[in-house]
Image: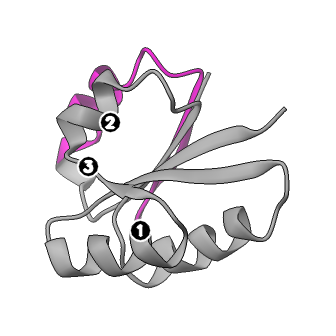
Amino acid sequence: MTVRFALLGAGRIGKVHARAVGSNPQARLVAVADAFEKAATELATAYGAEVRTIDAIEKSKDIDFVFIYQNIEKKVHVVLDKYQFHELVVVVNAYLIVLVN
């Protein structure tokens, strides 16, 4: 079974995890969203993924796992509420790592 990932945030740490996903034959990067479209496009292109909006990722049926790499400390609860449909969401920033099952 291939686990399908989305990344919210295409910065330094997002790239590290995209590389990890891309190197695993049982994982596939499906979508990337970032406030900077150029960063999202470059990362998505490098791994054969699509650039999508956060709303499009939320509605996607082809994503099993979402990594969130944005400095969103004050918005974490809003983001987590939006992603309750996913089995697992990981929020990562300078202050917080949250695993939600």
Q: Is residue 94 visible?
A: no
Say few, some or many: other residues with alpha carbon within 10 Å of mark 1 (under 14 / 14 to 19 / 20 or more). Answer: many
Q: Depth check: give the residue in front, 59 or 95.
A: 59
Q: What is the secondary structure assignment of the residue under circle 3?
A: loop
Question: Disc 1 residue type?
Answer: Ala
Look at label 3 and name its amino acid.
Arg
Q: Start and end of the magenta stretch? A: 75-99
Query: Are the residues at dot 3 and dot 2 in contact (C-beta closer than 8 Å)?
Result: yes
Q: Position of residue 66 (x, y in %)?
A: 49, 42
Question: Reading the chain from its start, which is encountered first: label 3 or label 1?
Answer: 1
Depth check: 49 or 81 in front?
49
Question: Residue 44 — which label?
Answer: 1
- Density class for disc 3 (Cα within 10 Å; few <14, some 14-19, many ≥20) is many
Mark 3 lies on residue: 52
Q: Quadrant of residue 57?
A: top left
**Up/down of 8 relative to 59, above or below:** below
Residue 88 included in the magenta stretch of the image: yes
